[in-house]
Amino acid sequence: MKVSDRLGSIPMSGIRKMFDLAGPDSVNLGLGEPDLCPPKEAIDGMNRAAAEGLNKYGPTAGIPELRRGVAEWFSGYADLTADNIMITPSGSSALLEITQAFIDPGDEVLVPSPGFVIYSPHTRLAGGIPVEYKLTEGDFVPDIDDITSLITKKTKMIVINSPSNPTGGVLDKATYKAILDLAEDTGVMILSDEVYDAYVYDDEHHSFMSHLDKAVVVNGFSKMMAVTGWRMGLICTGKEVMNDLVKMQYHVCASPNMPAQYGILNALPVMDGYLKNARDVFRARRDLITKRINEIDGMHITPPKGAFYAFPSYDLDMRSEELANILAGNGLICTPGSSFGKYGEGHLRFSYAADEKKINAGMDILEETIGELRRE
Ligand SMILES: Cc1ncc(COP(=O)(O)O)c(C=O)c1O
């Protein structure tokens, strides 16, 4: 049996490849998965729902109480109601549903580079053509001149991801406004992936939820509540396209996980305190990993402003995949920058969703390995 050309043309994610290389004693700074416990209220709420028999199919767009609760949770960004929110079986499937819903064969989609690994494959699965746009070096915000030069008659969508995986970059106000102007002038729609909005350390998050005439927004509970295994996400969109997205989701999964929705609903009231603590923990780790990297001769990083990734550059004349393989051999798992697109080469991604002991152990291996390679 032969798979479709669309699927056949897509490589396996470089993040998973590195994960498969990890030995039992490796220091794993490869995966973007918070090591914190989920809020107890989430687990209690899910268990209670399952015990009470809420184990059947539910409404396709998610249970109304949770849609209302989520609209209220994001009310600091925009005036939203339950009709703006659809609960999805993960942020990843939310992104897939949106590209399937909006992209026709031949449409061009501008994707960030370096950027999260699924935007280009999702575009291809919809028959579209991914076009990588550059992020600025250092701060890693979208390079507006580069984007402008790439827009053609076929450009349908631009993907924005702030805070960013893999760079930790956070959109500043001027760039945010420039993207909105560009969407206004060209008619290109914005797909804004905001799954790390809760993790901004030095600045504020600029959400496209306040511009649903131009943008469809994805968020999720994986990173927010440390429940990556529950597979729960959401789409926030204008009411006029919601019916089409609900139709799309019906054909993907009929309805999202029922007990998990009740768990999330039960945890929403405690999330302010939970996230304040999580941000404090991650900020301290961000400071630690930034300091350790900048102490290594030949490695450079501007402190990332959000998410939980460090994306330093290095001075060696070596491809990032080769360097990541050498590090894996020495017991440190990270992700080569080239996994995140053509502008990711020359970098490594470290996830600091790991405790300080692991970060220090990983940085010791990095320091030693880079030192040896520079002496060769
Ligand atoms: C930028 C970004 N968007 C979306 C996702 C998908 O998250 P999930 O499918 O767990 O909701 C991830 C996961 O790593 C991510 O980094």
Image (spheres, rainbow, N blue to C red):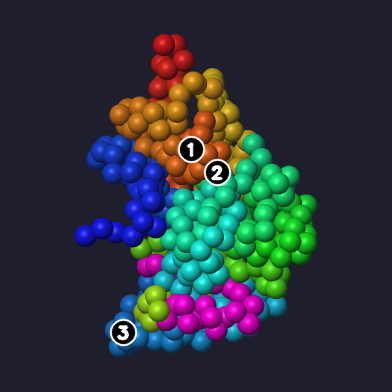
- The residue pinned by badge 3 equals 55
Q: Earlier in the sequence, mark 2 or mark 1?
A: 2
Residue under numbered circle 2: 114
Q: Among all residues in the image, which is located at the extreme top?
A: 376
State the extent of the magenta-drawn residues as a range: 230-250
The residue to which callout 1 is attached is 337
> Residue 46: percent from the left, percent from the top?
37, 77
Task: Report how many numbered discs are placed on residues in the image.
Answer: 3
Q: Residues within 10 Å of mark 1 (few under 14, many from 20)?
A: many
On-image quarter of the N terminus: bottom left
Q: Residue at x 54, y 22 (%)?
A: 315
Q: Is residue 136 magenta?
A: no
Q: Are marks 2 and 1 in contact (CB under 8 Å)?
A: yes
Residue 1 versus residue 168 in the image, above or below: below
Q: Main secondary structure of the magenta part?
A: helix
Q: Helix or strand or loop: what does disc 1 sit on?
A: helix
